[in-house]
Image (cartoon, rainbow, N blue to C red):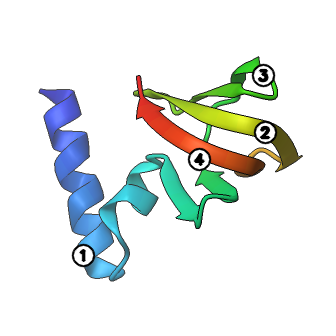
Amino acid sequence: MAEKRRTGLLEKTAQVFDLPADVVAGLPRLELIGDRELRMENHRGILAYGTQEIHISGGVFGVKVCGQELELRTMNALELLITGYITDIHII
């Protein structure tokens, strides 16, 4: 019941401030630029790292990025950037 109230509060806050609900709720946001860059906001850290596969925690779900010559270019507490030849992205 408390979770349902919280969800309603987040939705109302998003409406009042004219913000996307995912931003207010802290949900992960993915942005794929062509097949060479993937940006992810609100991540929870790297779970596995390799040049062909990178696994990222998104909190409520995970993201598996597959490709070749993958590289974690930048990462801070809020966002990360992966570059390389991205062939697949899986929600796990």
Mark-to-mark CA distance, 1 and 2: 38 Å
Disc 3 to disc 4: CB gap under 8 Å: no
Q: Mark 1 or mark 4, which has the lower sequence index? A: 1
Mark-to-mark CA distance, 3 and 2: 9 Å
- Across and down, in percent, residue 87 comes to 56, 43
Look at discs 1 and 2 and give the one toward the viewer: 2
Residue at which label 2 appears: 70
- Across and down, in percent, residue 14 comes to 31, 69
Instruction: Tell me if 58 is positioned left or right of 61 in this view.
Output: right
Look at discs 1 and 4 and give the one toward the viewer: 4
Mark-to-mark CA distance, 3 and 4: 18 Å
- Res. 15 mark: 1
Look at discs 2 and 4 and give the one toward the viewer: 2
Q: Secondary structure at mark 4?
A: loop
Residue at which label 4 appears: 42
Label 4 sits on what residue type? Asn
- Across and down, in percent, residue 79 comes to 71, 52
Disc 1 to disc 4: CB gap under 8 Å: no
Q: Residue furthest top?
A: 48
- Across and down, in percent, residue 82 comes to 75, 48
Label 3 sits on what residue type? Tyr
Q: Residue at x 61, y 32 (%)?
A: 66
Q: Mark 3 or mark 1, which has the lower sequence index? A: 1
Label 1 sits on what residue type? Gln
Label 2 sits on what residue type? Leu
Look at discs 3 and 1 and give the one toward the viewer: 3
